[in-house]
Image (tube, rainbow, N blue to C red):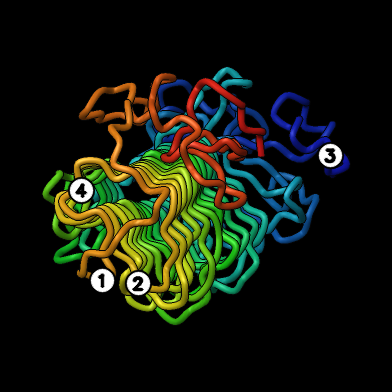
Amino acid sequence: MMRRAPPFLLGLALTLPAWAGVDVMFVRSDADCERNGCGLQNGSSRLNAWRTFAGPAYGASDGTANVVDPEDILVLCSEDFGPADVDTATVMIAPNNNISGTSTTARTRWTGDCSPYGGPKMAKVNGGGTIDRGFDVGSTNRQYIQIDNIEFYGFDQYGIINQGLATDADYWLVEANYIHDIRGLSSDCWFGRGSDVSLVGNRFDRCGQDNVYHEGDRFVFRSNKASNPGMDAAGTQGDNLQYGTTEAEGFDISENLLSSQTDVKQCAIVGVNGSPTSGILTANQCDGPSATAALHSAFFLQGTGTVIAQGNYAKESRYLIYAASGVKLIGDGNIGHDLSEYGIQCGTGATDCELTHNTVARVPVCFSTESASGTSKIANNIGADCTTAGIRKNAGDTETGNDLYRVSSMVENETTPTAPSASTVTTAPGFVGGTQPNTVNGFRLLPTSPLCGAGVYAGKYFDKTGRRILPPVTPGAFQCSSGRAPALR
């Protein structure tokens, strides 16, 4: 039995010899072993790696020799794992015991980074179009699992599946993987149920239905790239991210690059009508299919609760942000352009929305709270080239400090024109990108913009860069580069 290090040392496991920390074991492909040999094939080192995924044994008792058990690390050291390496008939990697780790610093880990041991930086695992799933621990709850630096592709159902209950506390970390070409009518790159799950720094591409599907509170989806969802799904099925059809509280969806080439696929759809929804949607980018998209929305929010959307960017979609029944949207510092219907809309049953310091251009209606309940606030936004109306609101909503430039109708109570507030103007913004900017930075304001300092302080909000807005304030998603610098949040 090998000695165990305290949890704070576990992060050093890949650079320390096995006796100084957790057990580190190795597996290589059948083809790799055939070419180069795998020695004793007992998993003790890269040169003595298990041959195929059928080789490793899994145990529930920590400290068992020559067995992958809780807190251990299994290193995948080949770039050509394929159908010959399958663990079971339908699953490439199928841990068949309770191999749950014990904490967020002592997860049981599968890593494809074999470079510290003379192997490749990323393992490649190919289902060959004949294997259902890349990684599957089964239907029983497994906690504290980490999967990183593995390329999964060519599977028929799922790249990685965590098929427990949405209410299970799982604490999985899935990081720096590349999951793609998981093809079939109901196939997902990632399918997960469980709370406290984090997907960080992964790439998802060309999956049959959703690139990422997850249910469970406190879900973290950060710094991922996802593109081309719904490759095989019919109708409106298939999104880059579909989250929270049962549990969607406390989420963090931040700094992701999302794109879709199909009109019916969303960049992100969050929550479900009637169920609790709350969290932050921050600094994400969505590239939609076209400026005439009739069905695709960048960020579609559902459920009952408060969602804070800050610093997001979308183009060539139907909406930048749509908030459905029950959602209180606090949206600031967002940018959208070339949208087919609305910039930001709080739809029927959304409540008490706050739309401040956003910039929207080239869209029929730039900002809308006309169908929402309660009292909404629309302040210090820039709407440019709004071909139907700059702002549509309820009569009781507050509207102040906005710049509505080249709009067909400035402000409407529902669809009836009404006088804008005295602080709302129709000034050419003076964008860095000229009169038709089409990049994020193109919507910054020149230091000479007449809007600099012309806004009305409306409360604690943030600009596109995440900086706190302090007086004197400027309408739009960016504060002017001259004048008082806003404090960091």
The numbered mark, 1 or 4, whose residue comes first in the sequence reads: 4
Q: Nearer the viewer, mark 4 or mark 3?
A: 4
Write down the quadrant of residue 286 in the picture: top left
At label 2, the amino acid type is Asn
Q: CA distance from mark 1 to mark 2?
A: 6 Å
Task: Indicate the quadrant containing the C terminus: top left, top right, bottom left or bottom right.
Answer: top right
Q: Which residue is mark 2?
A: 394
Q: CA distance from mark 3 to mark 2?
A: 55 Å
Is 187 located above or below residue 74 in the figure? Answer: below
At label 3, the amino acid type is Phe
* Percent position of residue 261, x then y: 18, 45
At label 4, the amino acid type is Cys
The numbered mark, 4 or 2, whose residue comes first in the sequence reads: 4
Element marked by disc 1? loop
The numbered mark, 1 or 2, whose residue comes first in the sequence reads: 2
Q: Which residue is mark 4?
A: 386
Q: Which residue is mark 3?
A: 8
Q: Residue at x 63, y 44 (%)?
A: 109
The numbered mark, 3 or 2, whose residue comes first in the sequence reads: 3
Give the class, few, some or many, for how many residues have Cα within 10 Å of label 2's Cα (few <14, many ≥20): some
CB atoms at circles 1 and 2 under 8 Å apart?
Answer: yes
Residue 414: give its label.
Answer: 1
Is 390 located above or below residue 97 in the figure? Answer: above
Q: CA distance from mark 4 to mark 3?
A: 55 Å
At label 1, the amino acid type is Glu
CB atoms at circles 4 and 2 under 8 Å apart?
Answer: no
Q: Is residue 117 visible?
A: yes
* Percent position of residue 134, x then y: 41, 51
